[in-house]
């Protein structure tokens, strides 16, 4: 994450093996990555916990009256448990095309950001193609591949970059 944008996120400091050493929620002065002072390690908001550990942490926080995961629970973790961060920038997805971002991630905390992320994965040259046979997305087993509508189908409505639900039925003619 560019350091100038990092104060909007939870920021981590890690050791050489990826162990979490510090976590600050939306700090005024984010801690830069030691090897790249122009960037900071930002939390993507994806966490894996051993269930009994998470229950223990939540019960402790509840007793203290702490209600914010990023401000109360995560900052305490590296001082009481073994916690590791995953460097998503090093993530490799097979089948990524030259027009795609190798480590695609977006914060979708606002409606505008959510819509922007939706547009990123739509169209003939998406920033990250979710229909990649070398990187299947597992779901409930009832997923249909996305459908790309020809431009002529969208022109009358003046709509661009949208998704159609799996149960949708509409006659399309060119």
Image (cartoon, helix red, strand yellow):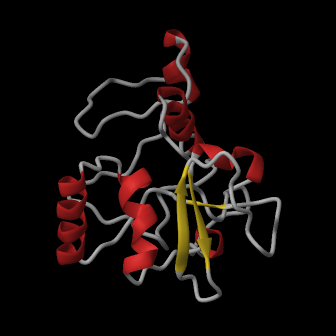
Q: Position of residue 153 (x, y in %)?
A: 49, 22
Query: Considering depth in this image, is 107 or 150 the residue closer to the camera?
Result: 107
Whether residue 125 is visible to the viewer of this picture, yes or no, is no
Tell me if 102 is positioned left or right of 46 in this view. right
Q: Quadrant of residue 143?
A: bottom left
- The number of numbered discs placed on residues in the rendered structure image is 0
Q: Position of residue 76 (x, y in %)?
A: 41, 67
Tell me if 47 is positioned left or right of 60 in this view. right
Q: Residue furthest front?
A: 64
Query: Considering depth in this image, is 14 or 103 the residue closer to the camera?
Result: 14
Q: Quadrant of residue 171?
A: top left
Q: Residue furthest bottom?
A: 17
Query: Considering depth in this image, is 7 or 104 the residue closer to the camera?
Result: 7
Tell me what residue is drawn at x 38 percent, y 55 percent. Answer: 72
Screen quadrant of the N terminus: bottom right
Q: Is residue 24 above or below residue 35?
A: above
Q: Position of residue 59 (x, y in %)?
A: 17, 62
Tell me what residue is drawn at x 54 percent, y 40 percent. Answer: 117
Tell me what residue is drawn at x 59 percent, y 89 percent. Answer: 17
Whether residue 165 is visible to the viewer of this picture, yes or no, is yes
Q: Is residue 121 above or below residue 53?
A: above
Q: Is residue 117 above or below residue 47?
A: above
Tell me what residue is drawn at x 22 percent, y 36 percent. Answer: 167
Q: Position of residue 162 (x, y in %)?
A: 47, 30
Tell me if 31 is positioned left or right of 167 in this view. right
């Amino acid at each position: 994450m560019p350091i100038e944008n990092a104060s909007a996120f939870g920021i981590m400091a890690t050791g050489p093996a990826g162990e979490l050493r510090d976590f600050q929620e939306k700090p005024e002065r984010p801690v830069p990555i030691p090897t790249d002072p122009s960037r900071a390690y930002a939390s993507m908001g994806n966490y894996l916990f051993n269930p009994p550990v998470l229950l223990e942490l939540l019960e402790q926080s509840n007793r203290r009256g702490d209600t914010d995961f990023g401000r109360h629970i995560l900052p305490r973790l590296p001082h009481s448990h073994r916690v590791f961060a995953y460097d998503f920038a090093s993530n490799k997805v097979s089948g990524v095309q030259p027009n795609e971002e190798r480590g695609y991630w977006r914060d979708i905390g606002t409606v505008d950001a959510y819509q922007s992320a939706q547009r990123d994965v739509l169209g003939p040259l998406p920033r990250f193609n979710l229909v990649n046979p070398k990187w299947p997305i597992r779901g409930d087993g009832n997923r249909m591949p996305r459908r790309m509508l020809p431009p002529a189908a969208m022109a009358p409505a003046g709509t661009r970059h949208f998704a159609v639900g799996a149960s949708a039925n509409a006659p399309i003619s060119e």
